[in-house]
Every structure is written in structure tokens, then in C-alpha cells.
Image (spheres, rainbow, N blue to C red):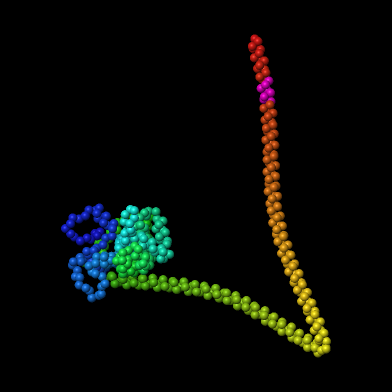
Amino acid sequence: MSDLTPQSEAPTPTTDKITQAARETIYLCNFRVSVDGEWLCLRELNDISLTPDPEPTHEDPKDPIAIERLNLMNMAKLSIKGLIESALNLGRTLDSDYAPLQQFFVVMEHCLKHGLKSKKTFLGQNKSFWGPLELVEKLTPEAGEITASVKDLPGLKTPLGRGRAWLRLALMQKKLSDYMKTIINRKDLLSEFYEPNALMMEEEGAVIAGLLVGLNVIDANLCMKGEDLDSQVGVIDFSMYLKDSTHSSKSTEGDGQITAILDQKNYVEELNRHLSASVNNLQAKVDALEKSNTKLTEELAVANNRIITLQEEMERGKEESSYLVESSHKASRADGTANGQVLGETRKQLKEETQLRLDVEKELEVQIGMKQEMELSMKMLEKDICEKHDALVELRQQLDEMRTLNHELSIKSQSSEAGAKQKSDIISRLEEKTNQMGSTIKQLESR
């Protein structure tokens, strides 16, 4: 059973019309989709009492667009739940031929197509959800790899095929829920592609994005090179979700256990993510502390060495000062009258020595400048010598080439002279032969 439509007295459409209609988004406007456990129940709106529920509702129950959003949300809920349960029971990596996975992509395609604005091109009107998916690359740089790989796929020619490939790559990367949340949070950007009452613009889109978190427990390996994503017909198979009385009693028993296991698994995965993030942060802090500790130890060792040298210098200064004080006391005691003369002489000597020191420093600066100039001139000379040496080498090479050319020319001239001699000999012989031939011709004529 591929789809459900309300029975009517009109004749059934042909297969061509069905496939043409299936290419567009299929919604159940005249039916209300309700979820009973893990199964899908379809009831016509005429059979439903439209009395208001005790819970506050802000939508009109007769609004077909609201009913479409609710139906699509329930279908997404059922497809995600069925995919997770079947994948866990299967216990292996899913491929592209897995039926629940295909139905999940079909349901997601219908959800993304709901309320799209039609863009007019030279080929006509076009509705594609590839435009909103391209926004993810601008909002999260991590999605740039997916968009680049989608654009590099050779078999994709339409925006619909690129959007389907993007959904499959995001599921394999386990980032589909994060990317959907980033799109839904930017309503200002989505308003360019969707109508105000579209699923992606309402609360149902946020609910579906939250449900997609459970798909992170699934490992999928999908090959898209040989798959024709452009011409696939996205039809929802309701037979996978319709309620069966014999199976409902058995399935409700394991619902609680499966949901508990899934919740525990999701909780453990979140804990692992947080713990890995905290471990990485702590490791970075430990590395930074180790680097700072090594720097501080090196600085402390340098400071200790400096303190030791300063202490030694202080002790030496103290000894010298004590020695000078003692010597000055002795000198003052020995000859107190001669202190003035000695001090004057010492001051004069000190001035002379300082003047000499300044002169020596000036001369030293001059010598240093001359030395630098000499070094520069030596470098320039070395450069000139190197250049001249290179020029000499080139001239020698040219001389050798000229010698070889002269030798070749001499050989050629000798060979040409020998050829000329041979030709002259041959000419002389030919002349003799012509003379002989003339004489013989004359003799023959005389005869």
C-alpha cells in the first residue's frame, strides 16, 4: 500500500497521473493522522467531533495547513521511531536499500517541501528545498564539507537531487539534528524560502528537529554514486505504520523497554560527550600549567644564580670598603698634615686618568669605525674578486669554445682543400678524356 486517498465515486486515475502527482508533495488534508502507541490511525475529519479540547489550542482544527503540519509531524515521529527500533534490532550498519531508512528520507523531504515558495525561472516555476539547506554552510562552517561533496558528485543535475544527497550525508555525519536546529532558529533567513505558515516556520519544525537527535545512535553507510537521486519518486508507504490489532498487543509490551533503553543510550552518549569535552579542556589546562611551570623553574634558577653572584659581589665590596677604611684610618693617623696635598694630587691624577680614558675611548670608537669600514671594503673586494673570477671562468670557456671552433674550421678547410684537389684531378682527367675523344672523333671522320 503506497498511499491512502479518500474513497469517492469518481473513476480512479491512471498510473501516469499517480506518478506525476507523487512527484509533488503529498498531504492528507481530509484526514487527521493520530498516533496510537507506535501505529498510525487515519480518521476523516467529518467523523471527528470538533468540540474544543480542555487544552488550549491556538490553531483552527478546520485549517488544512495546520492539519498538514500535524500529519507531517506525526509521520516524522513514526518514521524516526520505527527506524531507530528496526536499526537497533538489526544490529548492523544500514545501507541505502533499507526500507525504513528510505521512508525516513521521503518523510523528511515532504517536511522540507511544506510551504515552499515557488521561484520563477526561464524553465517555469521551481520548488526545491536545496536553497534552505545551503544556508547551513553560512551558519555553521562544519557543513561546508557536506555542501562541497554534494556539489562534487557527478550524477546530480537537479536541486532536488542535491537536497536528497545532503540529507544522506548529514545523517552519516550524525549532525542532521544540529543542522536542522540551526536553520529553524533563523526564521529571518527562512522567510525568503518558506511561507509564514510552513512547517519549518512553526513549532512542528522545532519538534521534528528535536526528534532527530535520536538518530545519532544509528550508523549508516550510504553509497550515492550509482543512485539516481534526481528522478526518484517520493511516496510515503503508509502500510508500514497502519495499525494491526494482532500486532498491537505484542508491540505495546516492548515499547516501554525500548524507549527506556534508547533514553539510557542517549543519556550515556551525552555524558560521554560532556566528559570528553571536559577531559580535553583539562588536558589543555594541564599542558598550559606544565609550560608555565617549566618557564617559572627556569626563571627561578636564573634568579638564584643572579642572587648568588650579587651576594658574592656584595661581600667583595664590603671587604674592599673595610680595607679602604682601615688604610685611610692608618694614613690619617700616620700623617694627618699631608692629607690635603695627597688628596689634591690624587684628584689631579684622577682627572688626568679620566681624560686619558675618554681619549682612549674616542680612539677606540674611531678604530672600531675604521675596522667596520675595512670589513665593508674587504667584503666589497671579495665580491669584486668573485665576480672577476666568474668573468674569467666565462672567458676561458669562451676561449675553449673558440679553439674548438677554429679546430673544426681548420679540419673543414683541409677537407675542402682535399676535395678541391680531387675535383681538379677529376677535371683534368675529364679534359684528357675529352681530348682523346675529340682526336678519335677526328680520326673516325677522316676515315
For the stretch drawn in magenta, what is the main secondary structure? Answer: helix
In the rendered view, would you say 410 is above or below 102? above
In the foreground, 217 or 350: 350
Q: Position of residue 274 (x, y in %)?
A: 42, 73
Write the residue at 70% across / 55% down.
384
Residue 333 as seen in the image, left or right of residue 223: right
**What is the residue that sits farthest to the top in this orientation?**
447
Write the residue at 44% across / 72% down.
277
Q: Position of residue 79 (x, y in %)?
A: 30, 65
* Residue 92 in sight from this viewpoint: no
Q: Position of residue 51 (x, y in %)?
A: 20, 72
Region in magenta: 425-432
Q: Is residue 426 magenta?
A: yes
Q: In the figure, residue 423 lies in which quadrant?
A: top right
Say which quadrant the N terminus sits in.
bottom left
Q: Is residue 393 magenta?
A: no
